[in-house]
Image: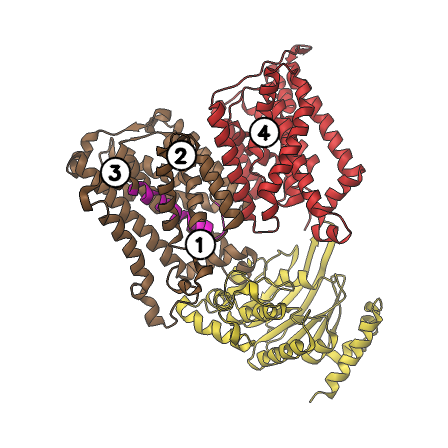
Amino acid sequence: MTALLELDGLSKSFGGVRAVKGLSFAVEDGEILGLIGPNGAGKSTLFNLINGVFMPDSGRLRFRGLDITGTPPHRVAKHGLARTHQIVQPLEAMTVIENCMVGACFGRENLPRAQALDTAREAAVFVGLEDRLETTAAHLTIAGKKRLELARALAAQPILLLLDEVLAGLNPTEIAHMIGVIRRLRERGITILMIEHLMQAIMSLSDRIVVLNSGQKLAEGAPAAIANDPAVIEAYLGDPALARELQQGSGDERRAP
Amino acid sequence: MRGGAPGGSAKHAAIVRRPFFWIIALVIAAFAVAPLLGNDVELRESLLLAAVYITLASNLNIMLGYAGYVNFGSIVFFGLGGYLCIYLMGSPGWPLVAAILVAGAGVSLLALLFGLGILRLRGAYFALGTIGVNEAVQAFVSNFDPWGGSSGIYLSTELFQALGGPMQALWSIYFLLVAVMGLSLYLSYAIKSSKFGLGLLAIGQNEDAAAVLGVPTALYKALAYSASAFLPAIAGGLYFFKSAFIQPTDAFDLTFSTEAIVIIMLGGQGTIIGPVLGGYFYEELRGWLLTSETFSHFQLVVAGVLLLLIVLFLPGGLMGWLHGRWPKLRRVLE
Amino acid sequence: MSGLFASIIDGVLVGSVYGLAAMGLTLIWGVTDVVNLTHGSAIVAGMFGLYLLTSTGVPPYATLPLILVGGFLVGLLLYWICVHRVIGRPPLMSLLSTFSVNLVLIGLGTAVWGTALFNVPVALPSVSWQRYTFPGTHILAAVLTAAIAGCLYVFLHRTRLGKAIRAVANNRGAAELVGIPTTQVLSLAFGLGVALAGVSGMLIATLFPFTLLSGDAYQLKSFVVIVLGGLGNPTGALLGGIALGLVEGLSTPFMPVSWTLVIEFVLFVIVLIAYPNGLLAPRRA
């Protein structure tokens, strides 16, 4: 049984800076894998490598057993891999439903336009944008744009979803809503690889965690184990508050049913 | 498309049933009938130019208004189409319809090849690249002896006999140009309502995000560039057949493509009826300025001032203004 | 062979002036994010500045400071007319707004002067070295270019104002946060860029005859130079100019002049596709 996504010795440098160094791990079918690490650890670069925005210097990427190393983003999307951006990228002048239709039309199903409308609407409703279907993306609030980002990726009907800090910048109510959405996504059988700085959230959501530091894998394992890993705590030592949060977060996990 | 599009697939297939289809038909009918009432040759000539402007602007809009790429040298399609058509009608003696169709197809194919190259450039670089394409083609044609080099090609006016004599031929060319204009509008409409159009609009908004969502950006841009070449090339063939003469300085005159940009911005970029409004008003304005002693030398100055004012104060053009004023109009007038 | 050598040296001399023009364009691009399509008109304005001033009796090289100051003021004016309102809007808008002003300027110019060829005779002794002779105007143009480029470098790197310009180019938002009046800096950079274009036009007019429509060709050259030298990099622009001058120097003995522009354009496209950040630009993310 091969994993859904396998990273094998992935490396990428910019100028003299090695952003990702010989990184290997796997995302199993159906899980939520959390990706954490201090700022500049190479998390977003990794996403850009996975979905083909950047070409890795070395290493291989396999998605559902298929080698997708160096495949351009638009083809990666067709394989059933969708993502959100840390800095939201709405198609500003288009409405919410149109944004989602782009996802539906050009995603995994490659739907004709007429059928894309229903899928698009369903995705928008799923994230709670049902009142905003005809709103122009530029006129959404930040929280709305974050939801749109997710809805658009969802409309592509992905097998694997890469979430890049979908909770950042949201207020507690919005965070709770978004966490609910992510949980329901997993129930639908979508595998998720997510970057998140909110420790409490990612510790309670994830089945497993991979910790990155300076482009390398520092640790990998269940949230509880990660939270007590001395190497991880040391990596966060520059940020003791975060280290404390890390441990509290795993506490939540234990209490959760 | 702005929310007015019906969702059901059965309804969707029949573009004919949408009101906008008939609005375009009305525009075409008005162009066809107006000069016939009272056999008004002067009106016909003015409308002929308007039809050419609308054709150029409407096709340019596919790149500029949908995909967000400025093509400053779109006239190269018109000029090359003219050359191919005139050349084929000359020594090989092809009939008009065959010549314009081959001109359209040939220029489209060439545009696809050019497009795959220069569309790897983005934004301003692409815009400059398009000026370069026009310069390069003009330099090539000026040195290309089979096409008469810089002195161009003359056609025998005898060829008008095939269309029933010069008088009748002018009417036929006019109707053909109006048909080309109509096809341009339907092409714009069909693209905008299609998946292809959705992809182009996404590229126009944010090309990187579009690619991540799965839009094959390079292919789509090249296809749009090529599609926007077909009808202008045919219009070029008809236009230069009318004067039975073509030379590089006329065929690749950047004034024409500049005016096409002004027309799009005046009417409203990315809309289908915008180029019609823009083309009609611009041609009216031009006709009025040409009769004025002082302004006849200042055609480009007026175009420039107009463009500047639109960009600064009315970036949505006339359609943007109408849509802002009466939001319900969005559903009817696209 | 000796002809080729002379041609290469001359190419370097003339190319440095192209580099000066491109410095103006790249300065504006780097600081304001606006691609200034009035650049060609600014060059032509410098040419006609030389023509008009010398016809009233001003010595040719004495027009340089006048054109520098005049160009700066015109640039400020252009900024407020066609750039200020489109700062931060989609790039399409600034392209179209500067393009439209270019149309107006060229249209007005042709209405007054037509499109005839102008020539400003500049009497300067040639310089001979061994078997080669180089026109004095070409040498002086290159020397003046080097001097102006040097001043610009010192201004940008050693003065408060210059540092403010570079700060705005780097990150406008951050510059604003630390209290740099960005609007003034943007207009200043635009004025400076237009002044450089004007002076380069004046220097080009001491070398070659010109028409009112020469601007487009030199504008394209400036873009080729920027592409060679890397965007927003004035020093690179000077090197890029010299590189373009070399290309011209090497190609003119072998092909008709009407093809020069086509070759430069093909170069432009090829370099852009192969090196999207510019040939001489440092490689970065």
Q: Which quarter of the image is occupied by the C terminus of chain B? A: bottom left
Mark 4 → mark 2, Cα distance in angstroms: 24 Å
> Which chain shows up in yellow?
A
Identify the secondary structure beneath mark 1. Answer: loop
Identify the secondary structure beneath mark 3. Answer: helix
Circle 1 marks a residue in which chain? B
Q: Which quarter of the image is occupied by the N terminus of chain B? A: bottom left
Residue type at the position of mark 4: Ile
| Whether residue C5 is situated above or below residue B57 in the rendered picture | above
**Residue marked by disc 4:** C43
> Which chain shows up in brown?
B
Instruction: Please identify, in this view, whether the residue under mark 2 or under mark 3 is nearer the observer.
Output: 3
**Residue marked by disc 3:** B42
Instruction: Please identify, in this view, whether the residue under mark 4 or under mark 3 is nearer the observer.
Output: 3
Q: Are marks 1 and 3 on the same chain?
A: yes
**Residue marked by disc 2:** B252
**Residue marked by disc 1:** B270
| Whether residue A184 is situated above or below residue B140 in the rendered picture | below
